[in-house]
Image (cartoon, rainbow, N blue to C red):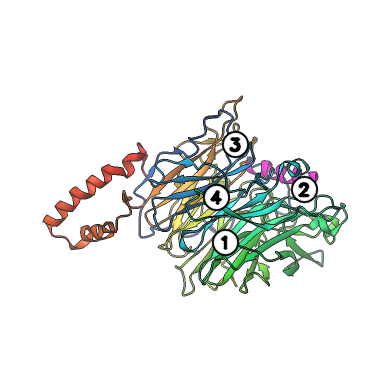
């Protein structure tokens, strides 16, 4: 990446998170945000939200610095097991965090998913998006996609490659495949891959179809070269991640245009911050990306003209990533084209909301005629026809939108029962660079949403920590299962001005009592209590349940806060 583009990425993120005016739309009057979504009871209520737990407690170094656990998953075979991707920002290495007791305690697993030839994965300046992504495949296979480079490439910031690691034992050991190797390339056209933001696994066939998405840049290319556009790439594996074909550059499939002063200008995928974000289900894969103009064909010669609202782009493929159809996902918005906190999009599919289920997308947005890059709200759009068309954006924040609070960096999870969970950073109760993590959920495919819940037990103060002032490097994460949503975030609460300590913290938003084990008798016990037991049976089962609870449920977590 060119130094100018990296500085632009950092400056946009810092200004937007601070909530100050960065860019303006000439002559346009400020308009309100999109309409708020309907808020209603969702057929289930939160039992409690646990106190925060330090997920990186195993690391005792005072100067430790972890990026947010933006990608989190619950083990589909055992909901007490939760895994989370994290990055040690000081050493630039990827790690896996794991809890075996439903988030009561966490450990940093020894070793790293990175192969020895590609030991580093962290991409500096990549604000507003994950450093790496994890996903489940069939038969409890865990995939971990990330950038990969060595010491020499770390210094040159060139020839970075993409790696997919794979574990069949919940991260205790890994095998790996190089998705794209850029090491042989030299000269002006030598590419460098800038981190992984997208990983999706379609498990509907006999073998996992694995999609990996990232941005490609050409750091040695001339400032006037078309290579300055970079690429938004998606590579596909049809054999469970053992091998990958040549990546598809989504820019070559894009025919969306925006008209300025009577001239139509083509859009391409955004080449700063990070893209694309992926989700896949039953033969369909979607890639969502921000937009910009081409460096060779832009209004006034400025590919990054942020005075022109641009739409989010959504690419759709039904032939395993060989060809793509790219459309505008919604109306033009101020932040979709890189206005700071518009960089992250949470994606998921739920069986709720229609006969084909529903794809749901969440991102930070301002109205078309907003005059500031700060003060975004979290919007969702939904598609009930396999990603071919999308609803208008609606805001899922339930605060007073006239107060111009800022919500940004949303992440999404979907529970097996179809509940859609969304978390994000929010400053409605704080000021300056202090934020909270908020949460909401939907049980009807994103049509209506629950009122927001604050998850963090104290403000996140990013005047401290390794993430420099005003720039929260990664979004929070959420892992979803029927009984709870596990939420994680980066937090410098133990930092001093000297140490800059930054940990990962987590909490559990709990809907039901979490069983102490995965005993097959638990669902039977719950059903009996719910409606089929006589008084004598109930009395006996209550004793059994209480014993199990004392053995290892919420008591493990200590104090709790009401939801």
> Which residue position holds label 4?
401
Nearer the viewer's eye, disc 2 or disc 3? 2
Residue 200's disc number? 1
**Earlier along the polypeptide chain: callout 4 or callout 2?**
2
Q: Secondary structure at mark 3?
A: loop
Determine if the magenta segment contains residue 11: yes
Are the residues tagged 3 and 4 within 8 Å (C-beta)?
no
State which tag comes first along the sequence, 2 or 3: 2
Question: In the picture, residue 562 is in which quadrant?
Answer: top left
Along the polypeptide, which appears first: circle 1 or circle 4? 1
Name the residue located 64 percent from the left edge and 63 percent from the top edge: 243
Q: Label 2, label 1: how many angstroms apart (C-alpha)?
A: 26 Å
| Magenta residue span | 2-17
Q: Are marks 1 and 4 in contact (CB under 8 Å)?
A: no
**Circle on res. 158:** 2
**Which x, y percent locates residue 71?**
54, 51
Q: Dot 3, crowdedness within 10 Å: few (<14), some or many (≥20)?
A: many
Number of marks in picture: 4
| Side of 115 where 167 appears, left or right | left
Disc 2 element: loop
Please tell me which of labels 2 and 1 falls first in the chain. Answer: 2
In space, the residues marked 1 and 4 are separated at their CA atoms by 34 Å
Distance from Cα at disc 1 to Cα at disc 3: 33 Å
Q: Position of residue 68 (x, y in %)?
A: 56, 43
Q: Are marks 2 and 3 in contact (CB under 8 Å)?
A: no
**Front residue (pair 266, 92):** 92
Q: Is residue 335 visible?
A: no
Task: Name the residue tied to disc 3.
Answer: 433
């Amino acid at each position: 990446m060119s130094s100018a583009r990296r500085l632009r990425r950092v400056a946009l993120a810092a200004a937007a998170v601070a909530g100050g005016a960065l860019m303006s739309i000439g002559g346009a009057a400020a308009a309100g945000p999109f309409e708020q979504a309907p808020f209603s009871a969702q057929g289930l209520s939160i039992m409690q939200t646990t106190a925060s737990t330090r997920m990186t407690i195993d690391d005792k170094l005072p100067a430790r610095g972890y990026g947010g656990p933006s990608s989190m998953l619950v083990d589909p075979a055992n909901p007490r097991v939760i895994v989370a991707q994290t990055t040690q920002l000081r050493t630039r290495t990827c790690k896996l965090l794991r809890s075996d007791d439903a988030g009561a305690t966490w450990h940093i697993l020894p070793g790293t998913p990175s192969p020895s030839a590609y030991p580093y994965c962290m991409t500096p300046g990549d604000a507003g998006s994950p450093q790496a992504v994890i996903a489940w495949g069939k038969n409890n296979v865990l995939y971990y996609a990330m950038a990969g480079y060595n010491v020499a490439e770390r210094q040159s910031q060139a020839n970075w490659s993409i790696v997919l690691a794979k574990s069949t034992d919940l991260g205790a050991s890994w095998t790996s495949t190089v998705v794209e190797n850029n090491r042989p390339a030299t000269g002006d056209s030598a590419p460098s891959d800038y981190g992984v933001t997208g990983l999706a696994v379609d498990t509907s066939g006999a073998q996992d179809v694995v999609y990996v998405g990232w941005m490609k840049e050409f750091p040695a290319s001339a400032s006037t070269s078309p290579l300055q556009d970079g690429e938004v790439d998606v590579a596909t594996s049809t054999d469970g991640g053992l091998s990958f074909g040549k990546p598809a550059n989504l820019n070559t499939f894009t025919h969306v245009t925006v008209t300025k002063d009577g001239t139509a200008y083509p859009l391409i995928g955004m080449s700063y911050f990070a893209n694309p974000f992926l989700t896949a289900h039953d033969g369909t894969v979607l890639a969502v990306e921000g937009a910009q103009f081409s460096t060779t064909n832009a209004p006034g010669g400025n590919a990054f003209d942020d005075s022109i609202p641009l739409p989010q782009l959504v690419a759709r493929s039904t032939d395993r990533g060989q060809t793509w159809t790219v459309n505008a996902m919604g109306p033009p918005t101020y932040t979709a084209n890189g206005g700071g906190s518009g960089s992250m999009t949470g994606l998921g599919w739920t069986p709720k909301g229609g006969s084909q289920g529903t794809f749901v997308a969440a991102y930070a947005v301002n109205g078309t005629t907003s005059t500031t890059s700060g003060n975004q709200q979290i919007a969702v759009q939904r598609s009930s026809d396999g990603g071919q068309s999308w609803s208008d954006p609606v805001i899922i924040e339930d605060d007073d939108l006239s107060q111009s609070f800022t919500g940004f960096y949303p992440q999404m999870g979907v529970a097996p029962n179809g509940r859609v969970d969304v978390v994000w950073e929010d400053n409605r109760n704080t000021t300056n660079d202090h934020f909270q993590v908020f949460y909401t959920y939907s049980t009807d495919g994103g049509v209506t949403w629950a009122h927001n819940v604050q998850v963090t037990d104290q403000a996140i103060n990013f005047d401290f920590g390794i993430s420099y002032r005003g720039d929260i490097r990664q979004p929070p994460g959420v892992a979803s299962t029927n009984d709870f949503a596990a939420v994680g975030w980066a937090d410098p609460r133990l930092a001093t001005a000297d140490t800059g300590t930054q940990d990962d913290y987590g909490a559990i938003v709990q809907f039901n009592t979490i069983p102490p084990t995965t005993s097959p008798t638990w669902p039977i016990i719950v059903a009996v209590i719910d409606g089929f037991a006589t008084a004598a049976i109930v009395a006996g089962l209550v004793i059994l349940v209480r014993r199990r609870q004392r053995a290892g449920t919420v008591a493990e977590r200590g104090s709790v806060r009401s939801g």
